[in-house]
Image (cartoon, helix red, strand yellow):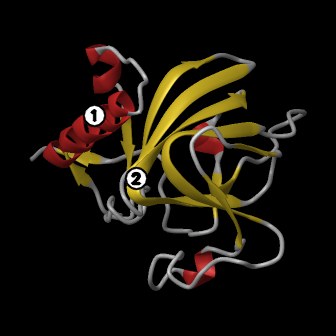
Amino acid sequence: MAMLTRKEYVEAQAKAAEMIRKAGIAITEEEAQNIEVVDFGLGHLAVEGAQILTFFSTARVSVKVIALFPYQTEPEHWHPSIGDDPGKEETIRVVWGTVRFYLPGEPTASSDAIPPGKESFYTVRHEVLLHPCQQLTIEPATKHWFKAGPEGAVMYSFSTCARDVMDRFSDPAVVRTPQIIEG
C-alpha cells in the first residue's frame, strides 16, 4: 500500500481549498484544513484520488464538497446495504468544471477515460457528461466512478447517511482511509 507524505497531503488540501473557493463556495480556514485527501492507497493521487470536505454528516443526511484535480478519477465503487439500510443514495451537483460520470448502461466511455492498466477495475462505462448546474442521482448499491475534465471540478455531494469507510471498490488494492507518513 502506498502512502501520502504529510507535505503531499497539505499541498493537496491547499490546492483543493483554492479550487473550492474559486468555484464560489465560501469555506473557513478550519474547513480548508479538514479537507480529506484520499489517494485510495494507490500512490498516484493525481490519477486516482479525491479531495473531500464534509460540511456535516448525521445519522440521516450528509453534505460534502468534492474537488477533483485535472483528469483525476475517483475509482469505481458502490455504497452497499448495511443491515436494514439499502445503502447511500447520493446526488452529485457540479459547481465548477466538468465531470465525466460513469454508470451501468450502454458502454459509451472513450478509451482515454480509464486510468492505464486499470481496465478490469472500471467495469461500468456508460458516460454522462456533467457541467455546472447539472446533477445526477445515484441509487444505493449502484457501481459508479467519475473523472474530472481538463480544468478539474468541484461538486456537491448530497446524500443519505454516509459511511464512506464501508464503500466497496472494484479494485481490491483500494484502501479508503488515507495513510499519511511524515515528510
Q: Secondary structure at mark 1?
A: helix
Tell me if mark 2 has few (under 14), some (14-19) or many (20+) residues whose alpha carbon lies within 10 angstroms of its own: some
Residue type at mark 1: give it: Glu
Tell me if mark 1 has few (under 14), some (14-19) or many (20+) residues whose alpha carbon lies within 10 angstroms of its own: some
Residue type at mark 2: give it: Gly
Residue 157, compared with residue 59, is above or below; it is: below
Residue 79, compared with residue 104, is above or below; it is: above
Q: Which residue is mark 2?
A: 152
Percent from the top left, x then y, of residue 49?
42, 55
Which residue corresponds to the image point at 19% horizontal and 42% vertical from the top-left? 11
Estimate the spatial distance between the alpha carbons at disc 1 and disc 2, rounded to whole Å: 12 Å
In the picture as drawn, the residue positioned furthest to the left comes out as 183
Q: Which residue is mark 1?
A: 18
Q: Is residue 50 visible?
A: no
Earlier residue among tags 1 and 2: 1
Residue 7 shown left or right of residue 79 in the figure: left
Percent from the top left, x then y, of residue 165?
57, 41
Percent from the top left, x then y, of residue 31?
35, 19
Which residue corresponds to the image point at 87% horizontal and 39% vertical from the top-left? 86
Residue toward you, 59 or 137: 137
Residue toward you, 93 or 7: 93
